Amino acid sequence: MITDIQLLNLLDSDPEKGLDQMMNCYMPLIYTIVANKVSGIYSREDIEECVSDVFIDVFNNRNRIDINKGSIKAFLAVIAKRRAIDLYRKKEGKRNLHNIPIDDLFDIGTEEDITNLVAKKEENLKLIEAIKKLEQPDREIIIRKYYLNQSSKEISKAINLKVNTIDKKASRCLQKLKKILGGVL
């Protein structure tokens, strides 16, 4: 596999070949990131166009890539995530809790996260599936409390339940999730 420095040099010396090499190395990762955000909302062609836009963005900004701050892989992943979120927001307009894809609650932030993307994604999918098994309002309470960091008082106002009811339901939901996940949470 080509190193980041070699790839940057290739992008400068032979841009077409460099872009082709970058796409060969990172297309599956970038496609996965974009598809996870917008599949079911956009067509495969729209997803492919967004992926192409990511590579063009990175190519056009190749002089701004600082290998000391992170890898090309990390740079691509961040651009892909931002592009996909922009695409999602464009289609969905104003977002609220009921139309946030649960995957949006899991953020890719550091290169270490990106390196471990597959393993983390599997863990997240298990947790997401467990949360989906909860009934309403339990599911909404867990998402608001543990992913959106809302207080019990804020949740109480949003879903019209007493604060102590929110606390009790959150505690019971955690126990349900532990059971669903085989004791690991």
Image (tube, grey):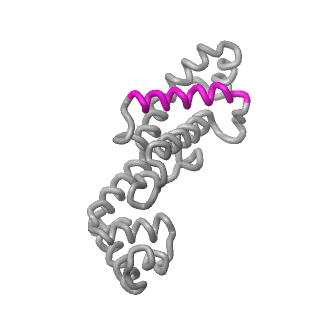
Above or below, comparing residue 174 to residue 10 in the picture: below
Q: What residue do we see at 70% from left, 18% from top?
A: 12
Residue 172 percent coordinates (x, y): 32, 77
Q: Nearer the viewer, residue 91 or 181?
A: 91
Q: Quadrant of the C terminus?
A: bottom left
Residues shaded magenta: 45-63
Position of residue 67 relative to residue 22, above or below, is: below
Q: Percent position (x, y) of residue 112?
A: 56, 47
Q: Quadrant of residue 162?
A: bottom left
Residue in view at x 48 percent, y 53 percent: 94
Magenta-span inclusion, residue 175: no
Identified at 41% across, 41% down, the residue is: 38
Q: With 120 as the anchor, is 138 left or right in this view? A: left
Rendering coords of residue 88 (x, y %): 46, 44
Q: Nearer the viewer, residue 127 or 49?
A: 49
* Along the line of sight, the residue nearer the viewer: 176 or 85: 85
* Horizontal arrangement in the rendering, residue 112 relative to residue 67 (left or right): left
**Picture quadrant where residue 45 is located:** top left
Image side of residue 160 versus residue 111, left or right: left
